[in-house]
């Protein structure tokens, strides 16, 4: 075999080996990524996202405001995972309370009343209990609805029959926010106008 032929053969072998190892490496990389994604625990990321949501929709009245998060949510989660899980449940409470209150405003019953969410046929079953498995109390005053959760430390649901608030009382509370009371209960108020702000502004 001539010198040029041997050189070409070596180049061909080298290219073939490179292609073989490169292809094998690519498939190994794909297999490794696929395995990692199957075993990836997404729970911390869900908790972090819900914690961020709670920072936007929860208004705390008990104690001083929480400190600003150091260097981002991920670092803060590693420092206090249980605190993040607690705040994530507050966000879930806001979601359920919004769903219940919206259902009442859109689907009734109308009028002025107080009842437990477990007795509300128009509500979705998944939103009738707070994250601590207690029913909400719902109070309607014309076009305003109040939802109350007993909160994370209560042994049971709030006593709905003891809730006495007027439409004027509800008007003093922030709307579409979850208000944490000094006793630890969680309160949300929405009105029909708050669901349709564009229509309300044109009326």
Image (cartoon, rainbow, N blue to C red):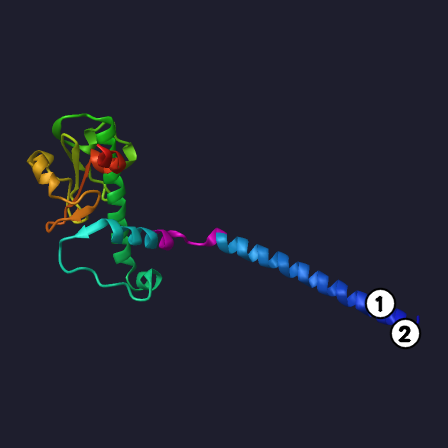
Q: Is residue 163 visible?
A: no
Residue carrying label 2: 3
- Quadrant containing the N terminus is bottom right
In contact (CB < 8 Å): disc 2 and disc 1:
no
Question: Does 103 sit above or below residue 77?
Answer: above
Please state the horizontal and vertical placement of residue 103, each as a whole percent of the image. 25, 31
User: Which one is nearer the viewer's eye here, 108 or 171?
Assistant: 171
| Residue at the image point whose x is 26% and y is 48% from the top | 91
Q: Is residue 52 left or right of residue 160?
A: right
Question: Does 1 sit above or below residue 160?
Answer: below
Whether 68 is among the magenta residues is no
Looking at the rendered structure, the secondary structure element under dot 2 is: helix
Q: Is residue 70 left or right of residue 177?
A: right
Q: Quadrant of residue 102?
A: top left
Start-end of magenta stretch: 38-46
Please state the horizontal and vertical placement of residue 139, each as a whole percent of the image. 14, 34
Q: Is residue 123 left or right of residue 36?
A: left
Q: Residues within 10 Å of mark 2 (few under 14, many from 20)?
A: few
Q: Is residue 45 visible?
A: yes
Label disc, if present, on residue 9 of the rendered structure = 1
> Which secondary structure type mostly characterizes the magenta part of the structure?
helix
- Quadrant containing the C terminus is top left
Looking at the rendered structure, the secondary structure element under dot 1 is: helix
């Amino acid at each position: 075999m001539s010198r040029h032929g041997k050189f070409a053969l070596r180049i061909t072998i080298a290219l073939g080996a490179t292609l073989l190892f490169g292809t094998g490496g690519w498939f190994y990389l794909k297999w490794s990524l696929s395995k990692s994604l199957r075993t990836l625990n997404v729970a911390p990321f869900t908790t972090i996202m819900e914690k961020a949501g709670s920072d936007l929709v929860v208004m705390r009245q008990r104690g001083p405001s929480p400190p600003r998060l150091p260097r981002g949510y991920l670092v803060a989660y590693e420092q206090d995972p249980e605190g993040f899980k607690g705040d994530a449940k507050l966000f879930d409470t806001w979601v359920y309370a919004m769903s219940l209150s919206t259902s009442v405003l859109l689907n009734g019953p109308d009028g002025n009343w107080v009842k437990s969410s477990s007795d509300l046929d128009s509500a979705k079953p998944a939103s009738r209990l707070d994250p601590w498995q207690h029913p909400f109390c719902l109070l309607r005053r014309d076009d305003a609805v109040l939802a109350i959760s007993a909160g994370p430390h209560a042994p049971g649901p709030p006593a709905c029959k003891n809730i006495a608030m007027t439409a004027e009382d509800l008007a003093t509370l922030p709307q579409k926010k979850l208000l944490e009371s000094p006793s630890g209960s969680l309160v949300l108020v929405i009105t029909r106008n708050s669901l349709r702000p564009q229509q309300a502004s044109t009326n």
